[in-house]
Amino acid sequence: MPDSIQNEVVEYRAFTSDDIPAAHALSMSVKWRHRADDWRFAARLGRGLAAVAQNGELAGTALAFEFGAEAATVGMFIVSPEHQHHGIGRGLLTRLMDRLGSRLLLVHASEDGRPLCESLGLEHLGTIHQHQGAAFQPPLVSLPPGERLRPIGAKDTPRLAALASRAGGLDRTELMPALLDVSSGIALDRDGELIGFALFRRFGDGHVIGPVVAPESADQNRAKALISYWLASNAGMFVRVDTPARFGLSSWLEGLGLPLVDTIEQMALNGPPPADDTLRQFALTSQAVW
Ligand SMILES: CC(C)(COP(=O)(O)OP(=O)(O)OC[C@H]1O[C@@H](n2cnc3c(N)ncnc32)[C@H](O)[C@@H]1OP(=O)(O)O)[C@@H](O)C(=O)NCCC(=O)NCCS
């Protein structure tokens, strides 16, 4: 239905897979590194809106990702530079918020998106540090006695979903199988019990390590060992890790040759998510799906 907001009339309609080529061009226009495949993955998991300008061009997108009945994240939220500041971002976000009702709503807000999120009542939860690079030096990290890394197998999926759900406070039952379709995984095993893991997948013009889930410990060596595993087996490749600043891995990542390139705010309405404090999600899956 056409809708007039401030000074630009756009049509808001459901985002479909036919929008992916134009959405890919849109994300490149704001310098996001997503490939068309990354959009396909997002569109498979999320349901969202396209804002279409009067000349038929895709002016903006926002996708919502639902986690169980209680929570949702919003991502792939972009308005093309020539259409920004005309109320389209607000139009997209408010429509998704109406649809999501009283759910816990989570957004990784960029500097551009922060004022809008604040004006819609979202509150700051914390800061994410985006580290990336190709010239890194993976260290050897020792694990506590009885713990070792092993490949993950098909039978591990329910356990991975349960650990990720507890660590981040979002129901990952549906996300995990889809994520494993496009990821490789390494598990942290303690005396035969899977207690943590790290996934690794193609993203943008390189790879991303995430999610990384492990029990909390003072030295964070479990998370470091999981991340180091993927760095050691991909030396010289472009790798990205998005980590919550409060978990203190940033200086270690910098020291390995993965500089901090951006910070992003975690914002929530009706939050924060009910995470289990004995477990930590040390790295995001992605900014869109947390
Ligand atoms: C964030 C983004 C989607 C906002 O889209 P938009 O269509 O320009 O947003 P709106 O015109 O609806 O503006 C919403 C409000 O935020 C403010 N705002 C928008 N962009 C801003 C900016 N760059 N700096 C400061 N304030 C800004 C506007 O003043 C407006 O306030 P108002 O409603 O009180 O007038 C757009 O800037 C964008 O695509 N940025 C690059 C991609 C990105 O960072 N996406 C992640 C967003 S979380």
Image: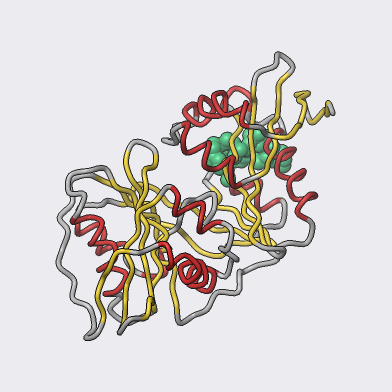
Mark count = 0
Classify 135 as above or below 254. Answer: above
Residue visible at 32% across and 69% down?
A: 223
Q: Would residue 103 be found to the left or right of residue 193 on screen?
A: right
Front in this rendered view, residue 17 or 113: 17
Q: Which residue lies furthest to the top in this view?
A: 55
| The image quarter in which residue 210 lies | bottom left
Quick check: 230 above or below 62?
Answer: below
| Position of residue 134 measured from the top left corner of the image (x, y, whole percent) | 22, 44
Q: Which residue is located at x 39 percent, y 48 percent?
A: 262
Is residue 25 visible to the viewer in this orientation of the structure?
Answer: yes
Q: Which residue lies furthest to the front in this view?
A: 155
Q: Which colour scheme is used?
A: secondary structure
- Classify the position of the N terminus by image quarter: top right
Q: Against 203, is 268 above or below?
A: below
Which quarter is ligand 1 in?
A: top right
User: Which of the 4 image quadrants contains residue 269?
Assistant: bottom right
Please state if 32 lies on the left or on the right of 289 as rendered. Answer: left
Q: In which quarter of the image is residue 282?
A: bottom left
Identify the residue shown where x is 57% and y is 70%.
Answer: 169
Residue 133: image x %, image y %? 26, 46
**Residue 112 can be seen in this image:** no
Q: Which residue is drawn at 75% across and 50% down?
A: 97
Residue 188 place in picture, x, y as percent: 32, 72
Q: Residue 94 at x, y = what percent?
A: 75, 45
